[in-house]
Amino acid sequence: MSSVNIAIDGPAGAGKSTVAKGLAKKLGYIYVDTGALYRAIGVYAMRHGVDTKDAEGVGALLGDIRVELKFIDGAQRVFLCDEDVSEAIRTPDASMAASNVSAIPAVRAFLLDLQRDIAKKNNCLMDGRDIGTVVLPDAQIKIFMTADVEERAMRRYKELQEKGINDSYEQVLKEMKERDFQDSNRPIAPLKPAEDSLIFDSTGHTLEQSIDELTALIGERV
């Protein structure tokens, strides 16, 4: 029996990762946060003094990079050259670095096989920017999750505050608008809904409401 794959795409701060984790747990699927893979490559480039917008420079590093997703006690952990970087990749700098390296064709090709291999072997729920359009175009269910940019920025601002990162709300909002523009206008695999995506707007929803509504939508189709 072939695996069941659910693709969730959408802009930064839409709640994709948090909702996807909850959905995966409810459905008994593996959760794959593809953005974490791009963050890991961005962090590797920064640590090696390479501009994350420098396609040639970043491309030259790929032969030395080993990035793995391991599922430990039901949670995804990200390993970069055998180091658990699950926390190190969650800073604002890592977020922008991920957006930069994700626009580099060599990086996307480098990670594509890894993502597809996980999906082939498991019932999985995968989130990112181009899962339904590029990575898993044959996914049985595709969801494009969005929310008002001000609400997305407030969610991210609160997350950063909880981690002791004291960026202002105005700075977070500015960076989120910049990332939205960059992700939506890059020439390779831009952020956009797949033609057969379900559009889900989480503005004003609690986490539980989003999970319950999407569980019902998925249940109608699987």
Image (tube, rainbow, N blue to C red):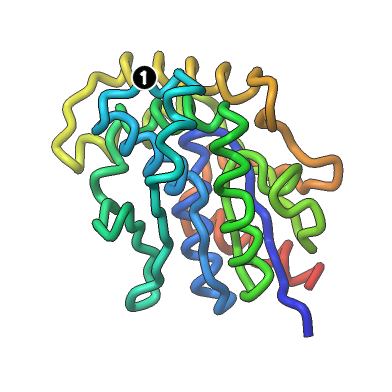
Query: Which quadrant of the figure contains the N terminus?
Result: bottom right
Circle 1 residue: 51
| Type of the residue with mark 1 | Asp
Looking at the image, residue 8 lies above or below residue 62: below
**Left or right: 187 in relation to 78:** right
Looking at the image, residue 9 lies above or below residue 139: above
Crowding at dot 1, Cα within 10 Å, few <14 / some 14-19 / many 20+, comes out as: some
Query: Where is residue 60, by image quadrant?
Result: top left
> What residue appears at the point 27 percent right and 51 percent down from the top-left corner?
85
**Residue 105: percent from the left, percent from the top?**
62, 31
**What secondary structure is marked by label 1?**
loop
Compare residues 161 and 182 and report the one nearer the observer.
182
Looking at this rendering, what residue extends furthest in the bottom direction?
Answer: 1
Q: How many marks?
A: 1
Looking at this rendering, what residue extends furthest in the left direction?
Answer: 164
Looking at the image, residue 8 lies above or below residue 221: above
**Residue 41: percent from the left, percent from the top?**
40, 40
> What residue appears at the point 25 percent right and 49 percent down from the top-left corner?
87
**Residue 82: percent from the left, percent from the top?**
28, 60
> What residue appears at the point 39 percent right and 28 percent down from the top-left corner?
97
Query: Where is residue 169, by image quadrant?
Result: top left
Compare residues 82 and 40 and report the one nearer the observer.
82
**Left or right: 32 in relation to 140:** left
Query: Where is residue 53, by image quadrant?
Result: top left
Query: Which quadrant of the figure contains the C terminus?
Result: bottom right
**Left or right: 81 in relation to 123:** left
**Residue 171: percent from the left, percent from the top?**
31, 15
